[in-house]
Image (cartoon, grey):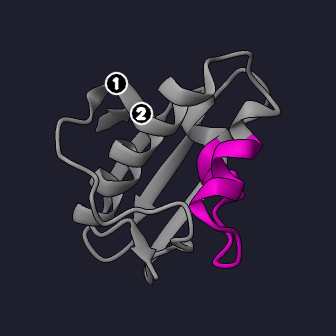
Amino acid sequence: MYRFSPDDCLWEAAVIQDTTVLSLAEGTSFQTLGVGEGGVVLKVGSGELFTCNDTTSVFLAAVDGQRTFADLVQAVLDEFEVSETVLRSDLRTFAHELHQKGIVRAE
């Protein structure tokens, strides 16, 4: 089991722009565990299970295939008092990692 945190991301995030729309990839399921409890991501085909912290859970809960990356950043800003510049950068890198792992699709 792998624990997701935006701080874990090391890759460049060039593919994710503010106008990019993210959705969960086919065969991927996300479930929040409740306020302050984070969440889990399951890749059904491989059985991989990932745990998420609160920030990641708010981000993934907002991923609906209609919201842009900028909308997703705003959803997290609405829940946490953090620097928008730092959050945008961290989430862009994190979204890129999720894309690379086949957890989200970017369009």
81 shown above or below 7: above
Residue 22, image x, y percentages: 53, 70
Residue 64 part of the magenta-drawn span = yes
The amino acid type of the residue labelled 2 equals: Asp
Residue range corresponding to the magenta coloring: 59-75
Residue 33, image x, y percentages: 69, 37
The amino acid type of the residue labelled 1 equals: Asp
Neighbours of disc 1 within 10 Å: few (<14), some (14-19), many (20+): few
Q: Residue at x 73, y 32 (%)?
A: 77
Q: Is residue 103 left or right of residue 14?
A: right
Answer yes or no: is residue 5 visible: no
77 shown above or below 19: above
Name the quadrant of the N terminus: top left
Residue 35, image x, y percentages: 79, 27
Identify the element where label 2 is drawn: helix
Q: Which residue is mark 2?
A: 90
How far is mark 1 from mark 2, CA to CA? 7 Å
